[in-house]
Amino acid sequence: MEILVDTVNLAEIKKYHQMLNLSGVTSNPTIIKKEGHVDFFEHLRAIRQIIGPDKTLHVQAVGETTAEIVADAHRVLQEIDHDVYIKIPTDPAGLEAMKQLKKENVHITATAIYTVFQGELAIAAGADYLAPYYNRMMNMNIDAASVIAELAQAIEMSHSQTKILAASLHNVAQVTSALKNGAQAVTIGTDVIAAGLNAPMIAAAVHDFKKDWQSMYGEQTIADLN
Ligand SMILES: O=C[C@H](O)COP(=O)(O)O
């Protein structure tokens, strides 16, 4: 199971890289905008510095034509490193760019996926990851769980190496549903992770255990015991 964070906030990436066994970081222009007008390449290099070479870093191309997308990909690979996963929207121009970039062995994350059909074409194009947009599908009354389950089946049936990296996850239920339905990876906003771990019932359980411990041993921790 791969857990990624859907943020480019350096402090948040540091915090969750330390807390969790993160597999990587994903971004898109909207996520980058939240940090203000940062130096794009410098910021991405800082993320790579934090997560190290073994984690995956997914950066979205912004060009609209195939030639522009391919040029964006080349620039990102040149400025950051050749292990970056280039996120490419799964539309006509993007699919053609995927086909071209796979010939150069570039890592591809096919993004903006709302339908099984888009996913199937991205699998055929050799994408390394598919990023189906869970919450955005739900907003359109598309059954996101079924789309992910069908894509998982398509990958299995075609013996493809493509993995599903569920994105646009707006709550813990969506995360667990994506994983249950066959996503190998999920990219989660740090607000969703925090909300999932800050449930009052977790704090209450920890508090009750502490109270019972203190009623016997006072302020000493286990490490303090003689
Ligand atoms: O790049 C993919 C994002 O996970 C989309 O998330 P969003 O629907 O919250 O903008």
Image: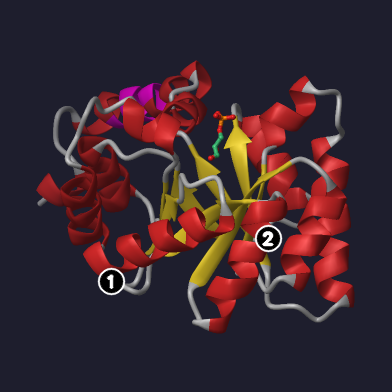
Q: Which x, y percent locates residue 93?
A: 65, 54
As displayed, is residue 214 above or below residue 111?
above
- Residue visible at 23% across and 44% down? 40
Residue 53: image tag: 1
Q: Residue at x 49, y 82 (%)?
A: 104
The main secondary structure of the magenta stretch is: helix
**Which residue does the numbered mark 2 point to in the structure image?**
95
Q: In this picture, is 53 found above or below 49? A: below
Q: Is residue 50 visible?
A: yes
- Residue 38 spot, x, y in % from top left: 19, 34
Three-letter amino acid code at disc 2?
A: Leu
Q: Residues within 10 Å of mark 2 (few under 14, many from 20)?
A: many
- Residue 86 in the image: state x and y as whole percent: 47, 60
Q: Toward the viewer: 127 or 181? A: 127
**Which quadrant: the N terminus?**
bottom right
Q: Does the stretch in magenta take in 203?
A: no
Q: Gap between marks 2 and 1, in whole Å?
A: 27 Å
Mark 2 or mark 1: whose residue is earlier in sequence: 1
Magenta residues, start to end: 207-213
**Residue at disc 2, secondary structure:** helix
> Secondary structure under badge 1?
loop
**Residue located 33% across and 22% down the image:** 211
- Residue 3 numbered tag: none
